[in-house]
Image (cartoon, helix red, strand yellow):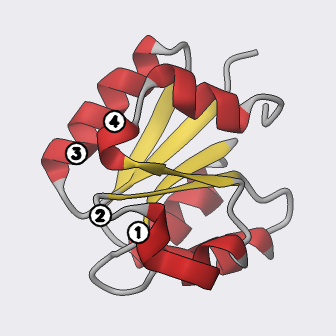
Amino acid sequence: MTATVLVVDDHPSFRRFARRLIEAGGFAVVEEAADGASALAAVRTARPDVVLLDVLLPDTTGFELAEALSSEPEGPVVVLTSSRSAGEFGASLSQSRARGFICKRDLTAAAFASLVRGAA
């Protein structure tokens, strides 16, 4: 069974890049969202197995959204991403409900798959 993915980022060019990369890795991107409110709606309708979630969104943070998604029944696995390095987020990253973090410049199909293995 192919794991389904929601890509959440406020930059359309990154969403397109991430979609191509994730689909090339054998995942199915079922939805995209540009902000937290759209992401919550998409999770409730599309029921993705995984959410690739930007840490900095226009209406919320990825940390807050990861917390909200963890309270959803059968909530998705969350992988955080940012153009900033993991070290810039300090304890917020380690205390997050996310499965892991991938810096945008390091996002590859293999790195994504290694974090979400077993999610579907």
Kindly report the distance in space between the C-alpha atoms of the residues bearing marks 3 and 1. Answer: 17 Å
Q: Secondary structure at mark 3?
A: helix
Q: Earlier in the sequence, mark 3 or mark 1?
A: 3
Q: Amino acid at mark 1?
A: Ser
As drawn, is 73 to the left or to the right of 87? right
Pinpoint residue 64: horizontal percent, then vertical percent. Answer: 57, 84
57 and 43: which is toward the camera: 57
Kindly report the distance in space between the C-alpha atoms of the residues bearing marks 4 and 2. Answer: 13 Å
State which quarter of the image contains the C terminus: top right
Which quadrant would residue 10 be assigned to in this image?
bottom left
Residue drawn at the location 74% of the way across and 70% of the way down? 97
Q: Nearer the viewer, mark 4 or mark 2?
A: 4
Q: Amino acid at mark 4?
A: Ala
Classed neighbour count for the residue bearing mark 1: other residues with Cα under 10 Å, few (<14), some (14–19), many (≥20):
few
Q: Earlier in the sequence, mark 4 or mark 2?
A: 4
17 and 110: which is toward the camera: 110
Residue located beneath label 2 in the image: 34
For the residues bearing labels 1 and 2, Cβ distance under 8 angstroms = yes
Kindly report the distance in space between the C-alpha atoms of the residues bearing marks 3 and 2. Answer: 10 Å
Residue drawn at the location 49% of the way across and 73% of the way down? 62
Kindly report the distance in space between the C-alpha atoms of the residues bearing marks 1 and 4. Answer: 18 Å
> Which mark is drawn over residue 14?
3
90 and 1: which is toward the camera: 90
Residue located beneath label 4 in the image: 18
Residue drawn at the location 52% of the way across and 67% of the way down? 41
Classed neighbour count for the residue bearing mark 2: other residues with Cα under 10 Å, few (<14), some (14–19), many (≥20):
some
Residue located beneath label 1 in the image: 38
Kindly report the distance in space between the C-alpha atoms of the residues bearing marks 1 and 2. Answer: 7 Å
Q: Amino acid at mark 3?
A: Phe
The correct choice, above or below, for 101 with respect to 54 in the image is above
> Which residue is the extreme one toward the left?
13
